[in-house]
Image (cartoon, rainbow, N blue to C red):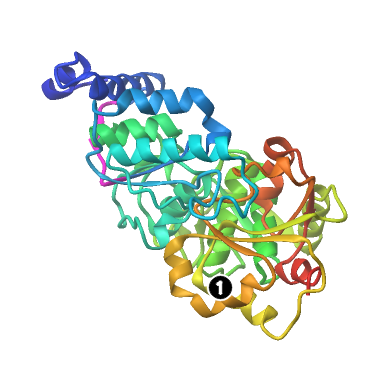
Amino acid sequence: MFLTRQEEDILDGEEGPGQQKAMEILTALGKIFDAEKLIPITSAHLSGVSYKTIGEGGLQFLNSLEGQAQIRVKTTLNPAGMDLERWRDMGVDPLFAERQKAIIDSYSSLGVQTCCTCTPYLHYNVPRLGEHVSWAESNALSFVNSVIGARTNREGGPGALSAAIIGKTPLYGLHLEENRHPSVIVEADIGDDILSHSLLGQVIGKRLGNAVPYFKGICPNTDRLKTMAAAMAAAGAIALFHVEGITPIEYGHELKGLERIRVDSSDIEKAKESLSSGKEPDLIALGCPHLSEAEMREIASILEKKERKRDTEVWFCTNRWVKERCPKEVTTLERFGKVVCDTCMVVAPIEDHHTCTGTNSAKACNYLPGLCSQKVVCDTTKGLLELIS
């Protein structure tokens, strides 16, 4: 991989050990994927935030960068393992909380914006069409690739952090136009609800693995697009998709000769059944990806004239930007559960208190059994809320 003189100097340690470490990671990635060179990026988004997932090793790595490096581009953080303000209400162990706060402090010392959300593209960190970025977090990178039309590979936490420190990323994969064209057509005939779109993502992610699907027959809004993106990336490795008439780059003239896949309501129902392994949730968690303003208002409208009838633990996971803009809805939701920020059910230590989680997210259904030792109840938003109201 070609390096400029300045990049070689960084690799040789002439700008400090922190930048040297970051450049070593980027050049290693470049060699693995046969990248021609490094290219500038305009932003980054980092995974590897929860103490549950990165542990002491991850914290030590971050500590080793303190005072040795600073980010060069706008950079945001994925969810942490707890609500940073009301972690006690979540039943989080004080030692876990201490280590989690240390992780956040380390990122902050590097100049990272510690918003702790998987949907920064809705407000905190919004790339522009055609920009090169370095994003981790499965739903986020897929959304910015597909819906916004920026360009990123499916980065891991260390790779995205290294790119943020250097301000560059290796030129390969989805940064190249030839790799962004549709490879298969998906003709979908499904319901209009959030869960149906999440399960569509589940079906396609599982069936295709790593591909660039082009969807016909659906007209999803932003919330349906983000849940599709999350499920496709969790069930498979899809980091880019196109939707006819919705996503910004129109490839309709290039579809001739592509394989066609059909998905209907029977496929959606089978996917739902395959993800469900429990019957009685002791935790209901909505917001994977984080709830938007529209979703908060929709849930509040369902609950506002009802009374809580069960003491099942309920989490409404969102970010602080949304919570601050929905004070009336937060008041309604708090009658039925907790509006938690900075975190979600997947990266929080829910296994300490719960054994079966109900969710409307196919992404969460994929991760909860392995990461959180949970049985899962997969159902619609309305179906889950009916269990408590």
Vertical placement of residue 335 versus 274, above or below: below
Q: Position of residue 283 (x, y in %)?
A: 74, 55
**In what quadrant of the picture does the N terminus appear?**
top left
- Can residue 171 be seen here? The reply is no
- State the residue lying farthest toward the bottom: 305
Q: Is residue 153 left or right of residue 218?
A: left
The residue lying at 35 percent from left, 51 percent from top is 150
Relative to 27, is 329 above or below? Answer: below
Residue at mark 1: 330
Residue 247, x across and y down, in percent: 45, 62
Residue at 36% from the left image edge and 19% from the top image edge: 28
Confirm whether the magenta stretch covers residue 259.
Answer: no
What residue is drawn where x is 48% and y is 50%? Answer: 84
Where residue 157 sits, quadrant-wise, is top left
Q: Amino acid at mark 1?
A: Val
Callout 1: SS? helix
Quadrant of the rendering where the C terminus is positioned: bottom right
Answer above or below: position of 119 versus 78: below
As drawn, which residue projects farthest toward the top? 12
Q: Position of residue 38 (x, y in %)?
A: 25, 30
Is residue 264 rendered to the left or right of residue 63? Answer: right
Where residue 325 sits in the image (x, y, percent)?
Answer: 44, 73
Q: Which residues are magenta?
A: 36-43
Residue 164 occupies quadrant = top left
Count every numbered label the image shows and give the total: 1
Frontmost residue, 29 versus 309: 309
Which of the 4 image quadrants contains residue 105? top left
Nearer-the-camera pick, 125 or 207: 125
Q: Nearer the viewer, residue 81 or 361?
A: 81
Residue 37 included in the magenta stretch of the image: yes
Q: Is residue 61 above or below residue 39?
A: above
